[in-house]
Amino acid sequence: MTNPSSNESAFKAIYEACEEGIIVVRKSGIIRMANKAAHQIFGYDASELEGKTIENLIPVSLRDKHVDNRQNYMKQPEPRRMGAGRDLLAVRKSKEEFPVEISLNVAELNGEKHVIAYVIDISKRKKVERALKKSEEQLILYASQLEKRVKERTEELEKQIIVTQKAEKEAKTALERERELNELKSRFVSIASHEFRTPLSTILSSSSLIAKYNTQEGAQEKRLRHIDKIKSSISNLNGILNDFLSLSKLEEGKLDIDVCEVNLVDACKEVIEELSSIIKPGQQIKFQCKGHPQSIQADPKIIKNIVINLTSNAIKYSEKDIHVGLDFEREDEICICIIDHGMGIPEDDQKHLFERFFRAKNAINVQGTGLGLNIVKKYVEMLGGAIKFKSELDKGTEFHVTFPKN
């Protein structure tokens, strides 16, 4: 049978060897006993804690509150495991405050309930935690600064990329512009030499033939026919020069616009009368007006040039009647329509129709500079209008020019 005296000695040895401070407190708050570790933690000599109140180990500012807490705890005491300990402040004999972790339990000794407090000095742990927290804060700060630097550097690089891309785009645009100008120069020289050569050759040959005709019968009729050819050729040359001059003025922004009230019916009728001299045998220009005629605010010269260009093209590319119409029945716009039943425009060529010097592949043998429709489109847009067309090969073409009523 085990000797009780031997058990008590064993328990006391374990009690004293424990690295945790163990303090046994009476219900009144008086310390009944404390182990060696507790004395060392609080800076007291051996057995010096016995007989003192537990509040001696609490900072002065917290003692009153601790008395209330201790009394409330004794009314309904319950264990508090070490794992669920609380971080508190304690005070050493030297008055130095330090952080501790405390777990509580209840035991009955000699018929009296006692509170057993297990105390751990966590000063070093807190020091490490503060150091870790400081390091973490420093790392967060460094990370934030690094992120900011990376962001600033990224933004700087993006700006440099944008500048580089812009410079590359400008250089590419300038190169394309130069290439386009060179191509236009070549096309201009080619088209101009061809278009000028034909009427000039006609003028030269007709002039030579007129000089050879004598007063014989029928000579006067031949002279008049050649004179008409000369007039027609000069008219063609004048038209070509007008196209080049108009394009030059439009490109340089030097074309003056003289806006006033324009009677579209009168303008179209004047154009039809002027072009009646160049229509082909058996060909007519038919005029139609839908709705109540209205005037628009525009430049009358530009309006006439638009109608002349589109109508003369219709005459040139068709052998049948030409239809010029005005539609005043639309709600917000007025439409000028020019319709022919000629050769039409190949579908593949239609997307290039308003480009400078462009000639459809089925119109290569028909006289023209390829500038007319480009000029017309610029004229229409200058006046705030729009131009559309639809065409079918060998069936004809329709142009619709619209201007806002207001």
Image (tube, helix red, strand yellow):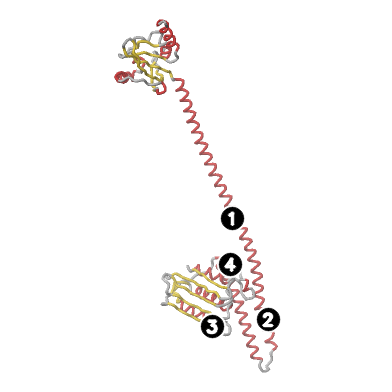
Which image quarter: residue 106? top left
Marks 3,2: beta carbons within 8 A? no
Q: Residue drawn at (55%, 46%), measured in percent from left and top?
A: 158
Where residue 24 appears, as percent x and y from the top left, is: 36, 13
- The residue carrying pointer 1 sits among few (fewer than 14), some (14 to 19) or many (20 or more) residues within 10 Å by Cα, namely few
Q: Secondary structure at mark 2?
A: helix
- The residue carrying pointer 3 sits among few (fewer than 14), some (14 to 19) or many (20 or more) residues within 10 Å by Cα, namely some
Image quadrant holding the N terminus, namely top left
Where residue 111 appears, as percent x and y from the top left, is: 31, 11
Residue at which label 4 appears: 352
Circle nearer the N terminus (3, 2): 2
Image quadrant holding the C terminus, namely bottom left
Circle nearer the N terminus (1, 4): 1
Residue at which label 3 appears: 284
Q: Secondary structure at mark 4?
A: helix
**CA–CA distance between discs 4 and 3?**
29 Å
Drawn side of residue 89 relative to residue 251, left or right: left
In this orientation, which residue lies closer to the viewer: 312 or 388? 388
Residue 204 disc label: 2
Relative to 375, is 138 above or below? Answer: above
